[in-house]
Image: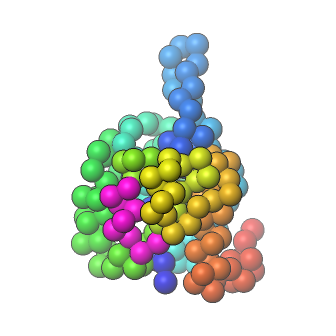
Amino acid sequence: MIKLILLDVDGTLTDGGIYRGNNGEELKKFNVKDGYAIVNAQKLGIEFGIITGRESELVRTRANELNIKYLYQGISEKTLILEEIMRITGLQKEEIAYMGDDLNDIKIMKKVGFSGTPLDGVNETKIIADFISTKNGGEGAVREFIETILKKDKLFQKFLINVK
């Protein structure tokens, strides 16, 4: 049973675009459907984390909005964070899922119990992923990943009852 879902940001929780405003500020588009699934899956005791290679105040704000417990930014070797989280929580790899879309996600995808990638993830992630979304990153791929996990772990009906 999955107890922790870890997520990449750019290309997974977002469409992978980096938008710049007139004053140089960075903008990202998050999908409200992903957030809805994250918040409601937490009600079933599933925890969430973000591991991303970039640093962004926007990501910190979004993680806080969604009560995401673990936030690691500016990480080049994501498996080191996975090992740290496993040491902190006592979770086994079979209890952890990860969704990512690019080459830097492959190592961690191979070390978790269940892995996923958005439809527009690179071919290398698609080859090893347990789940390939029918949606692109930032367009509900994370929600589909979460719902797939809930169905696999026989929690989806409970999820439907608890959603608000």
Residue found at the far bottom of this picture: 154
Nearer to the camera, 67 or 119: 119
Residue shown at 64% from the left, 48% from the top:
136
Magenta-colored span:
106-114
Q: Is residue 157 above or below residue 35?
A: below
* Residue 13 appears left or right of 128: right
* Residue 6 appears left or right of 80: right
Residue 94 at x, y = what percent? 40, 79
- Count numbered badges in the picture: 0
Indicate the colouring scheme. rainbow
Residue shown at 48% from the left, 78% from the top:
2
Image quadrant where residue 36 sits: bottom right
Residue found at the far top of this picture: 22
* Residue 131 appears left or right of 84: right
Q: Looking at the figure, which quarter contains the C terminus?
A: bottom right
Is 111 magenta? The answer is yes
Residue 134 at x, y = what percent? 68, 57
Residue 145 at x, y = what percent? 60, 65
Residue shown at 29% from the left, 59% from the top:
79
Residue 57 at x, y = what percent? 45, 37
Q: Main secondary structure of the magenta part?
A: helix
Image quadrant where residue 85 sits: bottom left
* Residue 33 appears left or right of 99: right
Is 50 magenta? The answer is no
Residue shown at 56% from the left, 66% from the top:
131
Nearer to the camera, 133 or 98: 133
Q: Is residue 101 above or below residue 22?
A: below
Q: Is residue 102 visible?
A: yes
Q: Is residue 77 above or below residue 38?
A: above
Q: Is residue 5 visible?
A: no
